[in-house]
Amino acid sequence: MLSPFDRQLIAATQAGLPLVPRPYDAVGAQLGVSGAVVRERLEGMLREGLVRRIGAVPNHYRLGYIANGMTVWDVDDALVDALGEKVGALSFVSHCYRRPRALPDWPYNLFAMVHGHHRAEVERRALQIHCLLAEACRGHDILYSERILKKTGLRLPDSAAGSTG
Amino acid sequence: MSGATTVLALDATDALLIRRLHGDLPLTDTPYADVARELGLSEDEVVARLQTMLADGVLSRFGPLFQIERAGGQFVLAAMQVPEDRFDAVAEQVNALPEVAHNYRRQHRFNMWFVLACSSPAQASAAGVRIEAVTGLRVFAFPKEKEFFVELRLPV
């Protein structure tokens, strides 16, 4: 679990790293520790997988990838994990997960978010996934997003972070 | 997506910087200066370009990307089939819950898809129950059972 210092470090940096010449020192000053302590803990968090990476997150909508389709697949349970790895490795796929079906309303157990410049591109890419899944796939659908109703960003919940956000 | 989306063109230096910073920012005293040196830029230029790209929305974030689930957070994808004539009212009811982090309208019989961000599975299921009580509609929860990939690396 997280130490109190981890929570402070997450709260101080989850909105972003300061764009100043010595950013880790700046975070440290805010938390009352040295920049070296901040760097060491971030290094540990990278090792533990608590931090995926430190860097830039492009907004793909602003870069022209305006079509976003949630492709969903009904894949043979015996093969879904092996195939999910392959689908996830495709460069245009983000957020690839195995999820439970909700029969009879929802037969799909593999979700892969596909991004493209337009719907035709998303559909071509879905076809690529379909070819990869081949006979293991019993059905699929593409759910296009039409409107963002709410977007607050995934933050550590208040109760866990000990801070707002 | 939203009709307000403006597509921005990146210059070659911005694209270079984004490609470099998809990877890890060095854990050094002066990481921007170090990246600048690698790319043949000045530290000031790297900082200024990052500031501009954040302000313009080309970058949605810059910094450590936490895998919050490892810190005890729970994120549950859920969906509802909302009657068209009630859609906006239900969206308002669902969005009113602080646990609802994202909510998207999608073109499907299941037309509302949202993510519940909670600190425990119990809190997530309580939020689902509360939404069902308030809306009178069934909430279908699709918690992830296995994650295959979560990093998008589109060419820039």
Image (cartoon, rainbow, N blue to C red):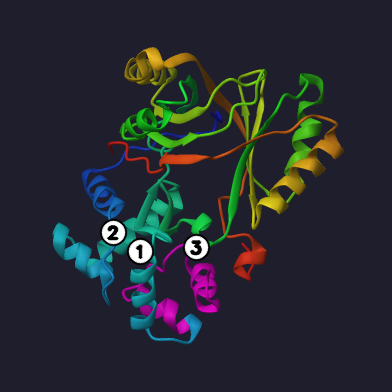
* Near-viewer residue (A42 or A68): A42
Which circle's residue, 1 or 3, is located before the other in the chain? Answer: 3
The numbered dot on residue A46 is 1
The chain that hosts pointer 3 is: A
The numbered dot on residue B24 is 2
The chain that hosts pointer 1 is: A
Query: At label 1, which amino acid type do we have?
Result: Leu
- Separation of disc 2 and disc 3 at Cα? 16 Å
Q: Residue at x 42, y 38 (%)?
A: A62
| CB-based contact (under 8 Å), mark 1 and mark 2 | yes
| Residue under label 3 | A14
- Specify whether residue A10 is painted magenta: yes
Tell if the residue under mark 1 belongs to the same chain as the one under mark 2. Answer: no
- Specify whether residue B62 is painted magenta: no
Q: Residue at x 52, y 27 (%)?
A: A109
Q: Residue furthest front?
A: A78
Residue B126 in picture, x, y percent from top left: 77, 48
Q: Residue at x 46, y 56 (%)?
A: B67
Q: Is residue A64 visible?
A: no
Residue B1 in picture, x, y percent from top left: 53, 29
The numbered dot on residue B37 is none
Secondary structure, mark 2, is loop
Residue A69 in picture, x, y percent from top left: 48, 25
- Separation of disc 1 and disc 2 at Cα? 10 Å
The chain that hosts pointer 2 is: B
Name the quadrant containing residue B48: bottom left
Q: Quadrant of the C terminus of chain B?
A: top left
